[in-house]
Image (tube, rainbow, N blue to C red):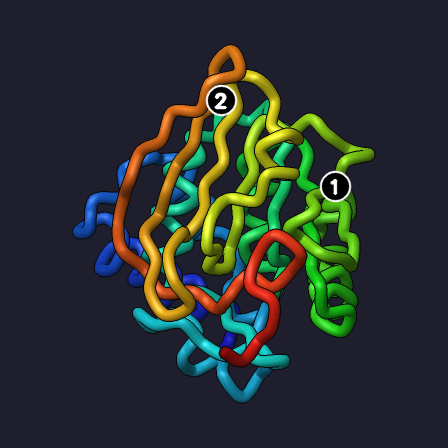
Amino acid sequence: MDAVNFQKLRNLMVDTQLIPRGIRDPRVLEAMRKVPRHLFMDESMWYKAYDDMALPVGEGQTISQPYMVAIMTELLDLKGDEKVLEIGTGSGYQAALLAELSQEVYTLERIQSLSEKAGEKLRGLGYPDVHLKVGDGTLGWPEAAPFDRILITAGAPEIPEPLIEQLADGGMILAPVGDRFSQQLVRVTKQKGKLLKEYHTSCVFVPLVGEYGWKADIP
Protein backbone atom coordinates (compact mmCIF):
# COMPACT_ATOMS: atom_id res chain seq x y z
CA MET A 1 0.00 0.00 0.00
CA ASP A 2 1.18 3.50 -0.73
CA ALA A 3 0.67 6.67 1.33
CA VAL A 4 -2.31 7.75 -0.77
CA ASN A 5 -4.21 4.59 0.13
CA PHE A 6 -3.45 5.00 3.83
CA GLN A 7 -4.83 8.54 3.69
CA LYS A 8 -7.97 7.20 2.04
CA LEU A 9 -8.28 4.57 4.77
CA ARG A 10 -7.94 7.25 7.44
CA ASN A 11 -10.67 9.31 5.81
CA LEU A 12 -12.88 6.22 5.57
CA MET A 13 -12.22 5.49 9.26
CA VAL A 14 -13.35 9.01 10.21
CA ASP A 15 -16.36 9.01 7.87
CA THR A 16 -17.69 5.54 8.75
CA GLN A 17 -16.53 4.89 12.33
CA LEU A 18 -16.27 8.27 14.07
CA ILE A 19 -18.75 10.77 12.63
CA PRO A 20 -21.72 8.34 12.60
CA ARG A 21 -21.04 7.57 16.28
CA GLY A 22 -21.19 11.19 17.30
CA ILE A 23 -17.62 12.49 17.23
CA ARG A 24 -18.10 16.16 16.37
CA ASP A 25 -15.05 18.19 17.38
CA PRO A 26 -13.57 19.34 14.04
CA ARG A 27 -10.05 19.52 15.48
CA VAL A 28 -10.25 15.93 16.72
CA LEU A 29 -11.57 14.72 13.37
CA GLU A 30 -8.83 16.59 11.53
CA ALA A 31 -6.14 15.06 13.77
CA MET A 32 -7.58 11.57 13.28
CA ARG A 33 -7.41 12.12 9.50
CA LYS A 34 -3.81 13.31 9.74
CA VAL A 35 -1.93 11.05 12.18
CA PRO A 36 -0.79 7.80 10.49
CA ARG A 37 -2.09 5.16 12.90
CA HIS A 38 -0.48 2.32 10.94
CA LEU A 39 3.02 3.64 11.63
CA PHE A 40 2.52 3.09 15.37
CA MET A 41 2.23 -0.68 14.97
CA ASP A 42 4.20 -3.50 13.42
CA GLU A 43 4.17 -3.53 9.63
CA SER A 44 2.52 -6.96 9.67
CA MET A 45 -0.56 -5.28 11.21
CA TRP A 46 -0.83 -2.39 8.76
CA TYR A 47 -3.62 -4.04 6.81
CA LYS A 48 -5.80 -3.85 9.94
CA ALA A 49 -4.62 -0.42 11.10
CA TYR A 50 -7.82 1.48 10.28
CA ASP A 51 -10.28 -1.27 11.21
CA ASP A 52 -12.77 -0.78 14.04
CA MET A 53 -10.75 -2.65 16.66
CA ALA A 54 -7.94 -2.50 19.21
CA LEU A 55 -4.70 -4.15 18.09
CA PRO A 56 -1.64 -5.53 19.91
CA VAL A 57 1.55 -3.46 20.05
CA GLY A 58 3.69 -5.86 22.11
CA GLU A 59 4.39 -6.44 25.81
CA GLY A 60 0.73 -7.32 26.38
CA GLN A 61 -0.36 -3.78 25.47
CA THR A 62 -2.73 -2.52 22.77
CA ILE A 63 -3.44 0.43 20.53
CA SER A 64 -7.05 1.30 21.25
CA GLN A 65 -9.97 1.14 18.83
CA PRO A 66 -10.06 4.36 16.76
CA TYR A 67 -13.50 5.32 18.12
CA MET A 68 -12.32 4.94 21.72
CA VAL A 69 -9.26 7.08 20.99
CA ALA A 70 -11.49 9.70 19.37
CA ILE A 71 -14.07 9.87 22.14
CA MET A 72 -11.40 10.11 24.85
CA THR A 73 -9.61 12.83 22.92
CA GLU A 74 -12.87 14.73 22.36
CA LEU A 75 -13.83 14.50 26.04
CA LEU A 76 -10.56 16.25 26.96
CA ASP A 77 -11.99 19.39 25.30
CA LEU A 78 -8.59 20.60 24.10
CA LYS A 79 -8.32 24.16 22.76
CA GLY A 80 -4.62 24.18 21.84
CA ASP A 81 -2.91 25.88 24.78
CA GLU A 82 -2.99 23.04 27.34
CA LYS A 83 -0.22 21.16 29.08
CA VAL A 84 -1.23 17.49 28.97
CA LEU A 85 -0.05 14.42 30.86
CA GLU A 86 -0.74 11.00 29.36
CA ILE A 87 -0.47 7.90 31.53
CA GLY A 88 0.37 4.91 29.34
CA THR A 89 2.37 5.88 26.25
CA GLY A 90 1.91 2.47 24.62
CA SER A 91 2.48 2.82 20.88
CA GLY A 92 2.69 6.63 21.01
CA TYR A 93 -0.36 7.12 18.77
CA GLN A 94 -2.46 8.89 21.39
CA ALA A 95 0.48 11.13 22.29
CA ALA A 96 0.78 12.18 18.64
CA LEU A 97 -2.90 13.16 18.58
CA LEU A 98 -2.50 15.09 21.83
CA ALA A 99 0.52 16.88 20.34
CA GLU A 100 -1.64 17.97 17.39
CA LEU A 101 -4.29 19.39 19.71
CA SER A 102 -2.44 20.88 22.69
CA GLN A 103 0.62 22.96 23.48
CA GLU A 104 2.77 20.51 25.42
CA VAL A 105 2.57 16.75 26.02
CA TYR A 106 4.19 14.65 28.74
CA THR A 107 3.72 10.90 28.48
CA LEU A 108 4.61 8.17 30.97
CA GLU A 109 5.10 4.46 30.26
CA ARG A 110 6.19 1.78 32.72
CA ILE A 111 7.60 -0.54 30.00
CA GLN A 112 10.92 0.82 28.76
CA SER A 113 10.92 -0.94 25.37
CA LEU A 114 7.53 0.56 24.48
CA SER A 115 8.60 4.05 25.57
CA GLU A 116 11.78 3.87 23.49
CA LYS A 117 9.94 2.62 20.41
CA ALA A 118 7.21 5.26 20.79
CA GLY A 119 9.80 8.00 21.23
CA GLU A 120 11.55 6.96 18.05
CA LYS A 121 8.25 6.99 16.12
CA LEU A 122 7.19 10.36 17.52
CA ARG A 123 10.51 12.02 16.66
CA GLY A 124 10.48 10.48 13.19
CA LEU A 125 6.99 11.82 12.53
CA GLY A 126 7.82 15.35 13.62
CA TYR A 127 6.78 15.41 17.29
CA PRO A 128 10.14 16.17 18.95
CA ASP A 129 8.55 18.14 21.79
CA VAL A 130 6.61 15.22 23.29
CA HIS A 131 8.32 14.51 26.62
CA LEU A 132 8.68 10.81 27.40
CA LYS A 133 9.52 9.13 30.70
CA VAL A 134 9.69 5.55 31.95
CA GLY A 135 8.14 4.97 35.35
CA ASP A 136 5.05 4.24 37.43
CA GLY A 137 2.30 6.24 35.76
CA THR A 138 0.12 6.20 38.87
CA LEU A 139 2.67 8.49 40.54
CA GLY A 140 2.43 11.03 37.74
CA TRP A 141 5.19 13.47 36.82
CA PRO A 142 5.38 15.80 39.83
CA GLU A 143 8.36 17.82 38.63
CA ALA A 144 6.41 18.88 35.51
CA ALA A 145 3.09 19.54 37.29
CA PRO A 146 0.57 21.09 37.27
CA PHE A 147 -1.21 19.80 34.18
CA ASP A 148 -4.33 21.19 32.50
CA ARG A 149 -5.39 17.75 31.29
CA ILE A 150 -4.48 14.22 32.39
CA LEU A 151 -5.44 11.21 30.29
CA ILE A 152 -5.15 7.69 31.66
CA THR A 153 -5.13 5.09 28.89
CA ALA A 154 -5.37 1.97 31.07
CA GLY A 155 -8.13 0.64 33.31
CA ALA A 156 -7.85 1.92 36.89
CA PRO A 157 -9.62 0.75 40.06
CA GLU A 158 -9.90 4.46 40.89
CA ILE A 159 -8.19 7.68 39.81
CA PRO A 160 -4.75 7.77 41.50
CA GLU A 161 -4.50 10.43 44.19
CA PRO A 162 -1.11 11.75 42.97
CA LEU A 163 -2.68 12.58 39.61
CA ILE A 164 -5.50 14.51 41.24
CA GLU A 165 -2.88 16.49 43.18
CA GLN A 166 -0.98 17.25 39.95
CA LEU A 167 -4.07 18.56 38.16
CA ALA A 168 -4.32 22.32 37.78
CA ASP A 169 -7.41 24.08 39.09
CA GLY A 170 -9.95 24.09 36.28
CA GLY A 171 -8.28 21.06 34.73
CA MET A 172 -9.67 17.65 33.79
CA ILE A 173 -8.68 14.03 34.28
CA LEU A 174 -10.16 11.38 32.01
CA ALA A 175 -9.80 7.72 32.94
CA PRO A 176 -11.38 4.29 32.41
CA VAL A 177 -12.43 3.31 35.95
CA GLY A 178 -13.76 -0.06 37.05
CA ASP A 179 -12.52 -3.61 37.56
CA ARG A 180 -9.80 -5.41 35.63
CA PHE A 181 -12.13 -6.53 32.84
CA SER A 182 -14.57 -3.66 32.25
CA GLN A 183 -14.57 0.05 32.96
CA GLN A 184 -16.48 3.26 32.38
CA LEU A 185 -14.94 6.49 31.18
CA VAL A 186 -14.96 9.00 34.03
CA ARG A 187 -14.16 12.68 33.54
CA VAL A 188 -13.18 14.58 36.67
CA THR A 189 -12.97 18.37 36.70
CA LYS A 190 -11.18 20.17 39.52
CA GLN A 191 -12.86 23.43 40.48
CA LYS A 192 -11.56 25.37 43.48
CA GLY A 193 -10.36 22.17 45.08
CA LYS A 194 -13.61 20.29 44.51
CA LEU A 195 -13.92 17.34 42.13
CA LEU A 196 -16.87 17.12 39.74
CA LYS A 197 -17.40 13.70 38.15
CA GLU A 198 -19.13 12.82 34.89
CA TYR A 199 -19.68 9.27 33.65
CA HIS A 200 -19.46 8.39 29.98
CA THR A 201 -19.25 5.29 27.81
CA SER A 202 -18.36 1.75 28.91
CA CYS A 203 -14.99 0.43 27.76
CA VAL A 204 -12.35 -2.26 28.23
CA PHE A 205 -8.67 -1.36 28.69
CA VAL A 206 -5.59 -3.26 29.81
CA PRO A 207 -5.00 -2.81 33.58
CA LEU A 208 -3.24 0.24 34.99
CA VAL A 209 -0.38 -1.31 36.97
CA GLY A 210 1.36 0.68 39.69
CA GLU A 211 1.41 1.78 43.30
CA TYR A 212 -2.03 3.42 43.00
CA GLY A 213 -3.37 0.98 40.40
CA TRP A 214 -3.46 -2.78 40.06
CA LYS A 215 -0.60 -4.60 41.75
CA ALA A 216 0.21 -7.16 39.05
CA ASP A 217 -0.51 -7.93 35.40
CA ILE A 218 -2.19 -11.23 36.24
CA PRO A 219 -5.06 -11.47 38.76
Give coordinates of residue 96: x percent, y percent.
Answer: 60, 51
**147 with respect to 63 (left or right):** right
Disc 2 residue crowd, few under 14, some 14–19, many 20+, Cα 10 Å: some
Kindly identify the amino acid type of the residue bearing the numbered disc 2. Lys
- Tag 2's secondary structure? strand
Image: 105 above or below 103: below
**125 with respect to 98 (left or right):** right
Give coordinates of residue 160: x percent, y percent.
Answer: 57, 44
- Tag 1's secondary structure? loop
Q: List the single residue furthest toward the left.
A: 20
Measuring 78% from the left and 53% from the top, which residue is drawn there?
Answer: 133
Q: List the single residue furthest toward the top.
A: 192
Within the image, what quadrant is residue 103 found in?
top right
Evaluate if marks 2 and 1 touch, with contact meaning CB atoms under 8 Å apart.
Answer: no
Within the image, what quadrant is residue 195 found in?
top left
Measuring 60% from the left and 64% from the top, which residue is drawn there?
Answer: 209
Give coordinates of residue 54: x percent, y percent.
Answer: 40, 72
Kindly identify the amino acid type of the residue bearing the numbered disc 1. Trp
Residue under label 2: 190
Comparing 177 with 113, the one in front is 177
Disc 1 residue crowd, few under 14, some 14–19, many 20+, Cα 10 Å: many
Structural distance between the alpha carbons of marks 2 and 1: 18 Å
Residue under label 1: 141
Measuring 58% from the left and 83% from the top, which residue is drawn there?
Answer: 43
Per the rendering, the mark at residue 107 is: none
Comparing 102 with 86, the one in front is 86
Within the image, what quadrant is residue 196 found in?
top left
Comparing 159 with 111, the one in front is 159
